[in-house]
Amino acid sequence: MSGLRRMALVAVMAMVFGVAVAAGHADAAVAPLQNWTTAPLLTATTGNLSGNFTVSPGPDRILVVAVQIYQTANVAFTVTGTYGGRPLTQATIQGTAQRRCTWIGYLKESDIAAASGTAVSLTITGAHANAYAYLASYQGVDQTTSVTDSNSAYYNQVAVSFGKAVAVNNGGYGLYAWANDNLTRTSDTESYTENSDGVRTGISTGIASKAFTATGTTNPTVTYSGTTRCSISAVTLNPAPSDSTAPSVGTVTITSPAANTGTYVPANVTFTAAITEPDSTPTCEYTTNGSAWVAGVISGASSPYTCTATVAGLTGSVTLNIRASSAGGGPTTGTALNRTVDTTAPVTTAAPAAGTYGSDQSVTLTPVDAGVG
């Protein structure tokens, strides 16, 4: 099949089925999971920003946070933040002593999965009067080098840019955030999609983004409705390597309780399996006795990952198993673990038997348990 016909087929499949079709590194692509909203999700005046945001399921995710600030004086500022207790990584900051400021940070898949909740907390230094934050998530992002390039700049003119040519890879995604003195964006020379543009209290804020299908640079001329004092921050996201190999599932092992035998288990158990998948983050499921597959919990920052399942109320003979899928294929099913549930407590006998004796006795206790104990 020719390259053009193949590319057309991939595009049609993506439009019809709503999925990204991976077939070689050039076809891997970053895609919005939860796109930017038309208005900021978090707002504050002189304080910090806080709220909640639930990241949707997806492969190789990244959470991106854009902050725009209006300061009461031309002073330097900083932004730090957490999501579910996990620290955000700063991608870029327009941190010169200006009253209109921008900052972009992010959180990778392993930290999203390890987050203790959905709480977003952003701490801002500097004497500010208003602060705003947008949040979005993307999938298909490289988890080793998530950000290809970034830059921030400040201008006092009608048309602005990123301040330099920002590198972008084939299949990557670009975005920029701005804060200016209450003027609207009218256009840019690279046809970014305007996700948000509005006059807020103190400043105007906005976000624009774009998918890229070729490796190169991006540095559009962004025009506003008049001469504006404008802070702008730009980031490009790096696509994950394509994955054409399904994950492998290691030995299914009961990890809790520790006291189990090769034959018997108690009614409530936790079992795990190692998932080997070097190219993308897998998902996993488990089953008991051939029942419907239920989502397990994936942990680990890289391959091999661990799939964990906890079940309760088992009876009789049970079969436990785990399977895994990834962008490369699947599901791949592990080797089933067969056990018998033991819910009978052990019986202990004493010799000699309980009674009254006229002299000291040496007593031998003998436990009898056909199961796990």
Image: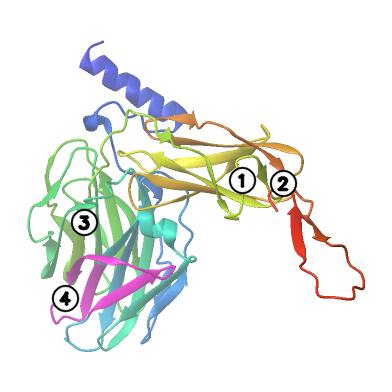
> In the rendered image, which quarter is residue 8 located in?
top left
Q: Residues within 10 Å of mark 3 (few under 14, many from 20)?
A: many
Q: Disc 4 versus disc 2: distance between alpha carbons?
A: 66 Å
Residue 80 drawn at (x, y percent):
29, 75
Amino acid carrying label 1: it is Thr
- Numbered disc 4: secondary structure: loop
Query: What's the mark number on residue 95?
Result: 4
Q: Earlier in the sequence, mark 1 or mark 3?
A: 3
Give the image's coloring scheme.
Answer: rainbow
Residue indicated by mark 2: 371
Hey, which residue is sitting farthest front in the picture?
359
Q: Are marks 2 and 1 in contact (CB under 8 Å)?
A: yes
Q: Nearer the viewer, mark 1 or mark 3?
A: 1
Q: In this rendered view, identify the residue nearer to me: 19 or 310.
A: 310
The answer to whether one can see residue 180 in this image is no
What residue is at 57 percent from the left and 55 percent from the top? 258
Q: Disc 3 versus disc 2: distance between alpha carbons?
A: 59 Å
Residue indicated by mark 1: 261
Q: Earlier in the sequence, mark 1 or mark 4?
A: 4
Q: Is residue 53 left or right of residue 367?
A: left
What residue is at 29 percent from the left and 38 percent from the top? 29
